[in-house]
């Protein structure tokens, strides 16, 4: 009768029932402590990636802006002027290489910045596959199966570690014929300027070297630019080996470089931002083209790391979703402010954290962009916060 007359009045049983079933953060953490700790570690890792990436991006952008402002183009590149010593200069022209890189055994002579020799041996290699067997969950187990194939490999494969060595034997490591190598030319010029060792390391676009020249009494065969030590390169046997040569930066090719003039050499230039500038581009390019290209590379790398940092943070918050949901249930006001109506909780929080970190990092270098990012990240949460404030004001006014 009492309940029928007053249906909205909470009863004693209801109060005890709600209190008894109220979830606890401590209890839930005890149940999910491992996944929660993993989630917390992932959240810290993602935030760390974002902090590191934005700091790197800001320093690189500032260094490139400083370089674009201070770079000099010498009146002539055939003569090195002492007054430009220590300055950031742009040099472009054809590579001048007088001394060729050689390999006497194969009759190779190449006027280039770098020459790479890759040695490959025909060997067995093992592939492991896992197949789950067993009908019942308790009886399930993994049976491993192995397959064996042969191919040209540039590293030694120890066949003694194979699951089945029968018929699968590679030569011992001591039988490896010669080692692969990379040789760099000691003297490379553009006009009167010498390329420093750091700049020569930037030549990484290797092209295969092909030649039909064969020294007398050679013990190899040449096919498609490869030097085969094999009786039949169409049907090689285990233990046969071959050599391939490639080069980077050939004499006469055109390049553009930006760096510090140190005597006659071009070396890294340190900016006031603490970053080094040493740029190399193929072809003849002007100042703006070189620096705009580098800024584009910086922005591309920045966005890749941003997505990686956000993804790790999002996954970390997803691992902690149960704890977050319990906390929000206990604090409905916080849920209204933090969680967006169109997304789930950990997605909205990860987006806000990402935008906040990016905005803070760019605050000194590009304050307008930084403020816009922080505002954009906080705006979806400021709207419900304003609604809560307005409703509380109305309640205060209506209250007698």
Image (cartoon, grey):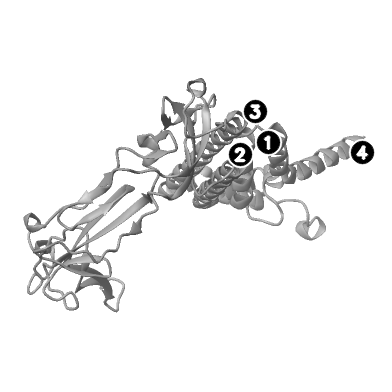
The one nearer the camera, 185 or 342, is 185
Q: Residues within 10 Å of mark 4 (few under 14, many from 20)?
A: few
* In this picture, residue 157 sits left or right of residue 72: left
| N-term-proximal mark, 2 vs 1 | 2
How far apart marks 4 and 2 lie (CA) works out to 43 Å
Location of mark 3 (residue) = 364
Say which mark, if any, is on residue 398: 4
Location of mark 1 (residue) = 370
- Residue at image position (26%, 48%) is 101
| N-term-proximal mark, 4 vs 2 | 2
Quarter of the image containing the N terminus?
Answer: bottom right
User: Are the residues tagged 2 and 1 within 8 Å (C-beta)?
Assistant: yes
Q: Quadrant of residue 209?
A: bottom left
SS class, disc 4: helix
Quarter of the image containing the C terminus?
Answer: top right
Residue 145: percent from left, percent from top: 21, 74
Mark 2, mark 3: which one is toward the viewer?
Answer: 3
Residue 331: percent from left, percent from top: 66, 42
Location of mark 2 (residue) = 358
SS class, disc 3: loop
Reply above or below: 228 against 43. below
- Residue at image position (32%, 43%) is 98
| N-term-proximal mark, 4 vs 1 | 1
The one nearer the camera, 127 or 216, is 216
| N-term-proximal mark, 3 vs 1 | 3
């Amino acid at each position: 009768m009492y309940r029928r007359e007053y249906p909205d009045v909470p009863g004693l049983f209801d109060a005890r029932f709600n209190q008894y079933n109220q979830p606890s953060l401590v209890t839930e953490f005890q149940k999910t402590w491992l996944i929660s700790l993993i989630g917390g570690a992932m959240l810290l890792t993602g935030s760390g990636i974002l902090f590191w990436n934005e700091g790197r991006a800001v320093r690189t952008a500032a260094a490139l802006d400083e370089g674009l402002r201070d770079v000099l183009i010498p009146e002539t590149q055939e003569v090195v002027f002492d007054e430009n010593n220590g300055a950031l200069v742009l040099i472009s022209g054809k590579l001048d290489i007088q001394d060729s890189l050689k390999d006497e055994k194969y009759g190779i002579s190449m006027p280039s910045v770098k020459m790479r020799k890759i040695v490959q041996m025909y060997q067995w290699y093992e592939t492991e596959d896992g197949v789950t067997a067993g009908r019942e969950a308790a009886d399930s187990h993994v049976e491993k199966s192995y397959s064996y194939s042969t191919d040209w490999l540039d590293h030694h494969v120890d066949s003694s570690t194979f699951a089945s060595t029968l018929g699968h034997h590679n030569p011992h490591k001591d039988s490896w014929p010669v080692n692969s190598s990379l040789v760099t030319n000691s003297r490379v010029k553009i006009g009167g300027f010498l390329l420093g060792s750091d700049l020569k390391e930037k030549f990484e676009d290797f092209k295969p070297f092909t030649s039909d020249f064969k020294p007398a009494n050679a013990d190899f065969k040449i096919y498609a630019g490869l030097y085969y030590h094999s009786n039949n390169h169409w049907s090689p046997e285990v233990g046969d080996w071959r050599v391939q040569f490639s080069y980077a930066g050939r004499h006469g090719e055109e390049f553009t470089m930006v760096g510090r003039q140190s005597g006659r050499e071009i070396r890294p230039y340190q900016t006031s931002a603490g970053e080094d500038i040493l740029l190399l581009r193929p072809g003849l390019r002007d100042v703006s083209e070189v620096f705009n290209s580098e800024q584009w590379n910086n922005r591309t790398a920045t966005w890749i790391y941003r997505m990686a940092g956000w993804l790790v943070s999002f996954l970390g918050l997803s691992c902690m979703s149960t704890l977050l949901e319990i906390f929000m249930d206990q604090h409905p006001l916080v849920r209204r402010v933090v969680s967006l109506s169109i997304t789930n909780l950990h997605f909205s929080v990860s987006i806000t954290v990402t935008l906040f970190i990016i905005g803070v990092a760019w605050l000194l270098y590009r304050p307008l962009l930084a403020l816009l990012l922080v505002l954009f990240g906080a705006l979806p949460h400021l709207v419900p916060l304003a609604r809560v404030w307005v409703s509380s004001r109305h309640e205060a006014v209506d209250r007698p």
